[in-house]
């Protein structure tokens, strides 16, 4: 059992005893910048995890992962910590049991989805494992609720956004399978000789933009051949420097305009669903998984040897041409839907 003292320097000291082989006890102490770090060091030294609550364990897990996970992931963890499974956060981690966890799940199930609750449970389990606590709990999550949405087809989206101020960001997502953070992170210097290098993200966290110079995953950094139509949209954006952003609009503005545009035409559509539509399109066009994953930046077992050395083979060019042909046909369609 450790006791804690905050030192004049602001650091925390954990005082504890360890048992010696001869039956005697020796007093030890460890010092760290925060209380939970001192408690973690004491727990590692003694092989226990006394006096740390579930909430403190989650806080410690988040702090330890802050510089190795993406800002969006950390932000999501912080939201979970503040808003989900709150009734177990003050329970000592060595006292948490299935009953208490199930009670917290039941409370959240009244106003949260299965996915939200499962994300919170997984975060708690990861924090407990970090501190060496068993995670064999027997709980039941709420059932999955089917969600039926009337999504437009890719061809309908082309006509929906064509000529609007969100055409470029939406077409980059729909045509090239870019995430909204990747679209907003693109700079004019990322376009060279008709090839777009996706290597940066601009995230909207707590209504503030956070630029991340590396992408979400290894496979997310990729190069894509720009079809002439998209290249012409990019070239039409006025700029004076290579480090200016191709899509300077805020995340909130893009989302609001797309939502309004889709609703006015009888659809429900989010920006991320444009990426889903691209994946469905590649499947319907028979694009091999290898090239679909490469274009979309999804991680697979068949990763490329070097993300900065993509080779545009003849087969890859055929893949690009097939996808480009679809969108060019959609752009040339006669039946253009009116814009609000």
Image: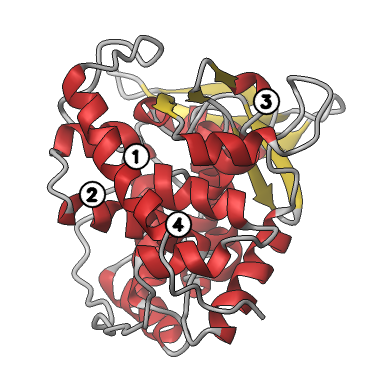
Do labels 2 and 1 touch, CB within 8 Å? Answer: yes
Q: Distance between the residues labelled 3 and 4?
A: 24 Å
Which-is-in-front pick, marks 2 and 1? 2
Relative to residue 222, is residue 298 drawn left or right? left
Task: Farthest residue to the right: give it.
Answer: 8
Give the labeled residue for mark 3.
188
Marks 2/1: CA–CA distance: 10 Å
Q: Residue furthest front?
A: 334
Q: Residues within 10 Å of mark 3 (few under 14, many from 20)?
A: some
Disc 1 secondary structure class: helix
Earlier along the polypeptide chain: callout 4 or callout 1?
A: 1
Residue topped by disc 1: 296
Q: Earlier in the sequence, mark 3 or mark 4?
A: 3
Whether residue 36 can be seen here: no
Is residue 332 or residue 340 the one in the foreground? 332
Q: Which of marks 2 and 4 is nearer the N terminus?
A: 2
Identify residue for label 4: 331
Task: Name above or below for residue 25 compared with residue 178.
Answer: above
Q: Is mark 4 on a helix, strand or loop?
A: helix
Q: Position of residue 311 (x, y in %)?
A: 29, 13
For the point 50% across and 22% down, the residue is: 194
Q: What's the residue at 41%, 31% (across, down)? A: 220
**Residue shown at 60%/68% (left/top)?**
258
Determine which residue is flagged by label 2: 282
Colour scheme employed for the rendering of this structure: secondary structure
The reply to whether residue 47 is in sight is: yes
**Left or right of residue 7: residue 190:** left
């Amino acid at each position: 059992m450790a006791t804690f003292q905050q030192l004049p320097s602001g650091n925390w000291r954990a005082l504890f005893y360890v048992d010696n082989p001869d039956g005697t006890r020796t007093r030890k102490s460890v010092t760290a910048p925060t209380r939970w770090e001192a408690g973690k060091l004491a727990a590692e030294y003694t092989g226990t995890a006394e006096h740390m609550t579930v909430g403190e364990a989650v806080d410690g897990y988040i702090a330890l992962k802050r510089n190795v996970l993406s800002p969006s992931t950390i932000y999501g963890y912080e939201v979970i910590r503040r808003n989900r499974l709150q009734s177990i956060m003050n329970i000592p981690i060595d006292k948490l049991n299935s009953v208490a966890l199930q009670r917290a799940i039941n409370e959240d199930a009244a106003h949260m989805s299965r996915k939200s609750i499962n994300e919170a449970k997984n975060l708690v389990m990861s924090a407990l494992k970090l501190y060496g606590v068993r995670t064999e709990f027997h709980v039941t999550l709420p059932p999955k609720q089917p969600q039926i949405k009337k999504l437009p087809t890719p061809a309908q989206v082309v006509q929906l956004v064509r000529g609007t101020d969100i055409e470029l960001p939406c077409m980059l997502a729909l045509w090239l399978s870019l995430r909204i953070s990747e679209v907003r992170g693109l700079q004019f210097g990322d376009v060279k000789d008709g090839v777009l290098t996706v290597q940066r993200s601009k995230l909207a966290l707590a209504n503030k933009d956070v630029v991340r110079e590396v992408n979400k995953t290894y496979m997310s950094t990729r190069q894509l051949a720009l079809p002439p139509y998209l290249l012409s949209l990019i070239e039409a954006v006025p700029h004076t420097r290579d480090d200016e952003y191709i899509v300077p609009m805020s995340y909130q503005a893009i989302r609001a305009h797309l939502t309004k545009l889709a609703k006015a035409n009888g659809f429900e559509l989010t920006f991320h669903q444009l990426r889903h539509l691209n994946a469905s399109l590649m499947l319907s066009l028979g694009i091999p998984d290898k090239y679909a994953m490469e274009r979309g930046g999804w991680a697979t077992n068949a990763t490329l040897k070097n993300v900065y050395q993509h080779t545009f083979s003849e087969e890859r060019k055929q893949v690009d041409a097939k996808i480009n042909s679809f969108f060019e046909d959609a752009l040339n369609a006669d039946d253009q839907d009116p814009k609000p």
